Amino acid sequence: MSGAGARVQIVVAVIGLIGALGVALLGNWDKVFPQRSQFQPEVSPPHAPIQSTSTPIDLVDAKTDIQIARSHEEAADPIVQSSSSVEGAPVMPLKGARARPLPPPEPVYPVAAELLPSVKDFESLLGFTGTHGQSDVEELFGEPDRVEDGDILRYLYFLNSKLMVIISKSRREIYAIEIDGVDTVAKLRDQGVEDPRLHYVGIDRRILVQHLGEPDRPSSTIFYYGFTTQEHRGNVEFTCYKHSDFKCSVLYVRWFQ
């Protein structure tokens, strides 16, 4: 009987242990066997590669060069300036860009074109021709400021060099007259000397060629024209220096004997 009782006790203990383990399992079922969530995690789509918005340095330089070139053209073109302006504001070139120099303005005639003498009209100047002599010059202008005596006589008036009358020593007749500068023309007029040929002193070389035609000798600064009339033969030269914007500041007339 003692052996059977011992087995009964063991069975009862095992049953109790199993029951305790079953109760514990049921109480912690969600921890031992967790349920899957009904909501699936949101998977983000793969990101597109980020594109760089920066421009390579060589492209930036090229764009800047194009903008500078355009600003040069706009600065020099009044039509572009007027069409590209906003409420009358002028188009400004980029900082550091040099504007193209504007073309020279159109020349202006000093007098009406019909009042300008022709080349043949230079057979006389200041009332003199090649047949007038030394005494005629002194009668009009008086004693010269200075006389240069050589193969020919040079009578210098108006600050010694602005008005020069060249006289042949052998014949004592006028060989040539040179007038230098618009200030000399003003002094001549102050003395009552009027001559329409004086309008050519200070004239733009474009007007000179437009009115008298192409010179006999090609040059950029000295315009040479020969003339022949019934009584005289000679030449007239206009000197138009670059430093004076090609205004013809020197008038020289020479008579051939």
Image (cartoon, rainbow, N blue to C red):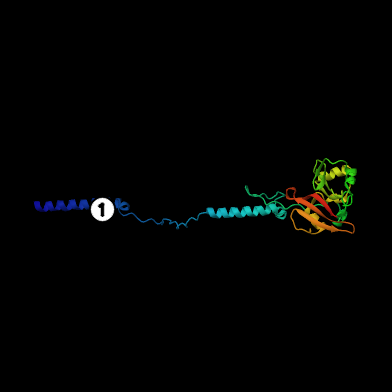
User: In the rendered image of this protein, does residue 252 appear above or below residue 214?
Assistant: above
Q: Amino acid at mark 1?
A: Gly
Q: Nearer the viewer, residue 9 or 69?
A: 69
Outermost residue to the front:
170
- How would you rate the neighbour count of disc 1 (Cα within 10 Å): few for under 14, some for 14-19, many for 20 or more? few
Quadrant where the C terminus is found in the figure: bottom right
Residue 172 relative to residue 45: left or right = right
Residue 122 relative to residue 98: left or right = right
Q: Residue at x 87, y 44 (%)?
A: 189
In the image, residue 126 lies at what x, y percent?
Answer: 88, 48
Residue 255 image-quadrant placement: bottom right
Residue 29 visible, this angle: yes
In the image, residue 136 lies at what x, y percent?
Answer: 90, 46
In the image, residue 181 lies at what x, y percent?
Answer: 80, 46
Q: Residue at x 90, y 43 (%)?
A: 139
Q: Nearer the viewer, residue 150 or 212?
A: 150
Q: Nearer the viewer, residue 37 or 151?
A: 151
Q: Which residue is mark 1?
A: 22
In the image, residue 148 lies at what x, y percent?
Answer: 80, 43
Residue 246 visible, this angle: no
Q: How many marks?
A: 1
Q: Residue at x 31, y 51 (%)?
A: 31
Q: Nearer the viewer, residue 227 or 57?
A: 227
Helix, strand or loop status at disc 1: helix
